[in-house]
Amino acid sequence: MNSTFYSDLENIFSKSRLSAYKKDSADDKTALARYLYNIELCKSLYVPLNVFEISLRNTIDKSLCTFAGNSDWYDTLPFDSSSKNKISEAKKKICKKGKALTHDRIVAEFTLGFWTSIITTRYSQAAFQSYIIKNNLKKCPASSKNIKNLQQIFEKMRILRNSVSHYERILHWKDLPQQHNQLLECIKWLDESAFQLLSEIDFFDYIFSAGVNPFLVLVSKKWNR
């Protein structure tokens, strides 16, 4: 099997995808091990990213409902043209599915990029942004609680989320442990209970510290059959 094992997998996974793990002239076994290790890293980040996105979405939604005095804040608050286009696109997607335009469906259709865009300098003069930061990021330390810093943090979380969701290579990111820690901190800012629950099932540190070696062993066993 060892003569065709890699070529078979390269055929199904694609040469370009696997070649990303051979940029330092690594051999085929190492490339496959790194590929599997990357999958496990992404898997370990999926749950905290899921908790982060849902917590951010629901926190901002509830805050804007209160601020606007109604549940249709996306129709009444002074968003810029870019945000308005995203709101319109979300509604169109729901209509294409033949479903009614309810509040919950519209809110669920908004992308993470839509939610993080609200915490950017684009809306630094908007009263609703100040309201969100004041009322929903109470546990964020004062040193981090300026809009430029928050924008950078949430943008990093968005990029990490997209990379994990699209199965991109992340094992080479030198600051991946720091990004994981920041992700947990963001969740804690949003909701202490969500953070406590996540802490019980988060296994990123275990996967990261184990490294690629367990996957080298696994690949070697398959390779030599």
Image (spheres, helix red, strand yellow):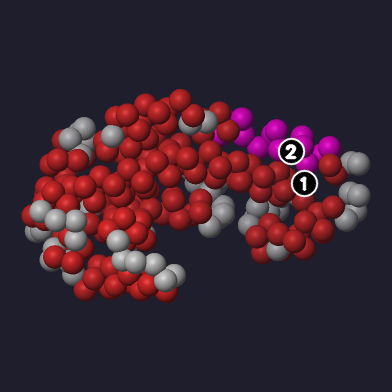
Which element carries disc 1, helix, strand or loop? helix
- Specify whether residue 212 is painted magenta: yes
**Circles 1 and 2: CB distance less than 8 Å?**
yes
Number of the label disc, if any, that sits on residue 216: 2
Task: Name which quarter of the figure residue 77 lies in.
Answer: bottom left
Question: In the picture shown, does residue 145 fall above or below 209?
Answer: below
**What residue is shown at x 84% (from left), y 42% (from top)?**
222
Give the percent coordinates (x, y) of residue 218.
77, 37
The residue at which mark 1 appears reads as 29
Q: Is residue 3 left or right of residue 64?
A: right
User: How would you rate the neighbour count of disc 1 (Cα within 10 Å): few for under 14, some for 14-19, many for 20 or more?
Assistant: many
Task: Name which quarter of the figure residue 110 lies in.
Answer: bottom left
Give the percent coordinates (x, y) of residue 81.
21, 73
Residue 5 visible in the shown view:
yes
Q: Specify the segment rendered in magenta.
A: 208-221
Q: Toward the viewer: 87 or 145?
A: 87
Most frequent secondary structure within the magenta stretch: helix
Q: Is residue 54 left or right of residue 66?
A: right
Question: In the picture shown, does residue 98 fall above or below 61?
Answer: below
Which element carries disc 2, helix, strand or loop? helix
**What residue is shown at x 71% (from left), y 49% (from top)?**
31
Q: Is residue 164 left or right of residue 120?
A: right
User: How would you rate the neighbour count of disc 2 (Cα within 10 Å): few for under 14, some for 14-19, many for 20 or more?
Assistant: some
